[in-house]
Image (cartoon, rainbow, N blue to C red):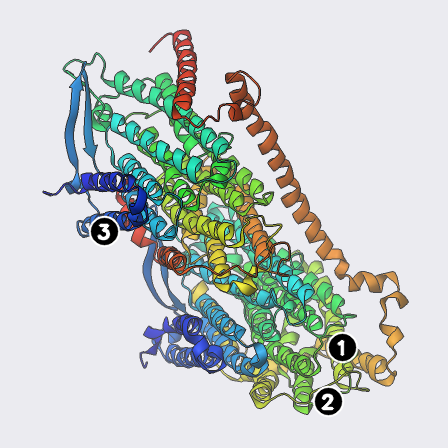
Amino acid sequence: MIGILDYVWLVPLVPVVCFVLAGLFGKKTPQGGGYIAVAGAAIAFIIAALASIDYWTSDYWANNQAYTVDMTWMMVGTFEINFGVYIDSLSCIMMLFASFISTLIFIYSIGYMDDQGEKKTRYYAEVSLFLTGMLGLAVSSNYLEMFVFWEVMGLCSYLLIGFWSFTHPEGDEASFRASSAAKKAFLVTRLGDVCLMAGLFILMYMVGSLDYADIFDNAAILADKYGKLLPVAILLMFAGVVGKSAQFPLHDWLPDAMAGPTTVSALIHAATMVKAGIYLIARSFPLFVQCTDVMVIVAVIGGVTAIYTASMALNNMNIKRVLAYSTLSQLGYMVLALGSGAYMISLGLEGGEHAEELFLLGGAAFTAGVMHMVNHAFFKALLFLGSGSVIHAVGTEDMRHMGGLRHKMPITAYTMLIGCLSIAGIPIFSGFWSKDLVLEAAFAPYHHGFGDAGTIFLILFILGMITAFMTAFYMFRMWFMTFCGKERGHCHGESPYNMSVPLIILAVFATLSGLLMLAFKSFGTYGVLESLAVGFGFEFPFHTGGETIVQIFKEIPTYIALVLAIAGIGIAYKLYVATPYDEEAFKPENHGALYNFNAKRHYFPELYNWISWKFGAGIAGIVNAFDKHVIDGTVNGLSNSACGGGDGLSAIQTGYVRDYAGLVVVGVLAILAIFALIFLYGGGF
Amino acid sequence: MDIPILSLLVIIPLIGALVTLFMGGQRADKAKYVAAVFSAVILVVSLFLLFSGMKNDYDFSQFDESYIWFQAAGLQMNIIFAVDGLSILMVFLTALLVFLVVMFSWHESDRPNYYHALLLAMEVGLMGVYMAQDYFLFYIMWEVTLIPMFFMISWYGGPRRHYSAIKFFVYTHVASVIMLIGIFAVVFGAQAGVPGIEYISFAFDAVRDNAAFDTVFQTFFFGLLFFGFAVKMPVPPFHTWLPDAHVEAPTGGSVLLAGVMLKMGSYGIIRICLDDKIFPNAMEFWQPIMIGLGIFAMVYGAYACIAQNDLKKMVAYSSISHMGMVLVGMGCNSVIGIEFAIFQMFAHGIISGVLFMVCGIAGHNFGTRDMRLLGGLAGKFPVYALFMMFGFMASLGLPGLMGFIAEFGLLYGLWEYLAANNLHALILFGLLDMMLTAGYYLWAMQKTLFGKETDKIDLSHCHDIAKNEVAVLAVLCALIALFGIWPTLAIDFIMPFAGAF
């Protein structure tokens, strides 16, 4: 105990102070406030690290308790809504990786955004505010507080996607695209958010509080008492996840969100904000497990998202879009693992002879989901920053104009290669461990014959396997197209040090974070599991890192996945390195309907437009016409007939109050007469 | 209290109005200084009121004032002023907005003495409405607000100002006459023929103490009063005066109209209709209607917003949508519903101030508020864009800002009502409203601020916001953030009143 834990509220507060400082005085400082943002993120990271160490050495950790401090935020009737902190190891892990990666990305931004002039101030202020949202989300002690930070992130995402929504360097068309993308991102996630808010209403109605502690304590009672309402609440909350973490069918905003600066894509749309949904599921596990059936839906959504979005990355030409689809697909993996884990734990809670085994496997699945979230943050941030470095050097996002860049920008090329190996699931690299655990989690319910949904999970497992193959293929397709073969565009050479150093650091973590999490207790798999023990109030059976590694190499699916990954890389090599580059092969008209259907994102943008037209502008037009002609028409008609026809209102526009007063008297008399009639008819008082 | 603080809140603006009114000719340009001083004094007095109530555990009874005005023909009119959890925030809001409007319209050059006299006269009426505890006084003050607003629109308005002004006047006046019938009914109904009553008093308390109406009477006269107030709020289908009035009204008039005058309607409903001594049984009939109308207003207003091209007309319709939410809260008739209805009245008062000022600036800086002509303003006018975004985000209920607290509380109150009455699915309309609200604001921002800079109007001579406008908007935005982050600050004032429901 060193007492820093009591100051953990500083973690989200420091960046918001930087937001204000950068916003007000950023223009006067070098780099438009960039150093303020970097300093804020770094300080937040240091405090988060000290507080985490403090937590991990405290009695709270030893007794599986969360550290909580609450103060009343407001009274809603008799309900108290709090504002406070809730620290368990999940919060710590969340704070740590978010602030660490943010620090690196902010440092990288100083190089990347160097040429943006006055706009830099806006950028650094907004990313600082964003960091507040992310860190606040991690330390929140109740759902409403979490929702506040959740939406703050949504706002920053909107602002930063639209960073170039006016005066875009590439011209007006591009600024229009950026502003459209920002709007789409906000509205689509808003759809999830309003559902989440409705879920919170139901929770508050059932429990009378939104504090995590209260809700988790009462979760079992709720399931008995509100058999119908609870699943609805959980589904609505999950809808919030679907919006924020861009799961099918609300996934289509994320590819468009790539219109923002690449650093923003790396920070918000890969490493942190889109993880908020995953964090929500992980945080709400004690509640979510009360509904077995809903958890199957969660897993299905995750599995479907994983393969569906991976398929769209297969033939995309835009380097950032490929990464965006891959982010979607990996998020699907996480949701799949968490859904499967919650499913098994919920079966375990019903008791029976397998309960212990179910808790073990369910806990492992939960760990897998969270671990993949952390690992993904590292390797995807690395990949995005790498792509940013490439875009910075080449000036385009189109991979057809890249090629052969590894000679000119070796640091970028080989750090990105590490990222690709990691995401493809090649052993030792971090992605291998967590992806394997995710697939195992999906396989477990079928493998061990738990529950009625075994077949569904078998299918999900197969989908996951195919996704693993696709992932390896499209990632290496991207790497080969960018860095191998002949140079097809113009390249400025390697990026400056403030960009390449963060890449190297991230590459180290993308390699090692998986092993680190298996090796260390506090911020590793045991720590993740401890958050379940805090929520549920009992300890979960646990495999140590060593046991887990042995386990991984004993299972056959591990080798199947590995073979599939290598096959994917091999095919990518065959198609994009061994075959000489042929421009014709990349033209849509030389391909079949399926290729183009895929390239058109399965017409999802059109679907969204159609829906928003149908339920927005379409109805609005009818309402407006009704308002103008029927309601206002009646009003004007009445006044015309009262004033003797013609253009009544304009005819009496004489400008004299006397006339209006006369008019009013007429009206009053009429009403009095009606009133008297009603009065007489009704028989008096 | 020796100094009659509450009377001062009515008397000071009255004096101010008279002084500025007679500052014609050469001195007209100085009227703004007079108006500024007077409105600043009122703001200080209202702040004093606020803080001394805060120190006194949110009890304002020490400020109560009661005088007999006149007794004649068996009737007694009183001048009774009091503030409580329902009115104190409205009083503060009135004082704040009038002061800020004076600051905002600093460069008004068209007959500035009349302009400021009208503003201060409006303040007299508004303060009176929110503090009066006597039906007669309440009605007089209600009408007093009407006349300055009428002249404000018809003298300082846009091209169709006469049509709008008359429509505003006739519409709301007819409604207030119907309201008057309701007032007479409850005043006489409660006291006529009751033994021991010498004079029939118009005081709120006299009516409350003697009211014992049967359900039919309650239901009917609740209806009349409700109609009178609902037109003011306004509730569709009695709303069409509002967009027209806003479109034509000058910015200052719009700010006061949306910020505090609409709230007179909801204030009246809470103060009179929801008084369970006068109308204990009426809600059985009216509650579903109020909830239904409120939901309708929310969604209808939001849809109407989407179809608007005039920025100001869109904001006007959004007022209808947000006041629909207040109606829903009042319809719930629960602690939460009333608490957040009042909070929303306060929040919307401040937020709509920002919104209408932003629209006004578009009108006088760029020469048009038509979104089809505007575009890409953010590049050239970043400060303007910042305030517009802030106002829109606050209005669409972004957490951390005031609008969210109100929206969350009101929709939760609605949910509680729906769940108790087995109408769970209707909450979907609330969610739809939230989606639509985000939709029209985002769309409006895209059309006006982002994308290609417009070539349909000449922006080369346009300047960004003036300094006085920046200051005013910054104050309002700071308040929006303050009460959004720290809602208890306002809720503590409301709770002593709302807790009784």
Categorize mark 2 by other alpha carbons within 10 Å: few (<14), some (14-19), many (20+): many
**Looking at the rendered structure, which numbered label has been put on residue B44?**
3
Secondary structure beneath label 1: helix
- Camera-side mark, 3 or 1: 3
Residue B439, position in %: x, y? 58, 50
Q: CA distance from mark 3 to mark 1?
A: 65 Å
The amino acid pointed to by label 3 is Val
Residue position for label 1: A399
Judging from the image, mark 1 belongs to the subunit labelled A
Secondary structure beneath label 3: helix
**For the C terminus of chain A, which image quadrant?**
top left
- Camera-side mark, 3 or 2: 3
Q: Are marks 3 and 1 in contact (CB under 8 Å)?
A: no
Residue position for label 2: A406
Residue A320, position in %: x, y? 68, 73
Judging from the image, mark 3 belongs to the subunit labelled B
Q: Residue at x 38, y 21 (%)?
A: B219
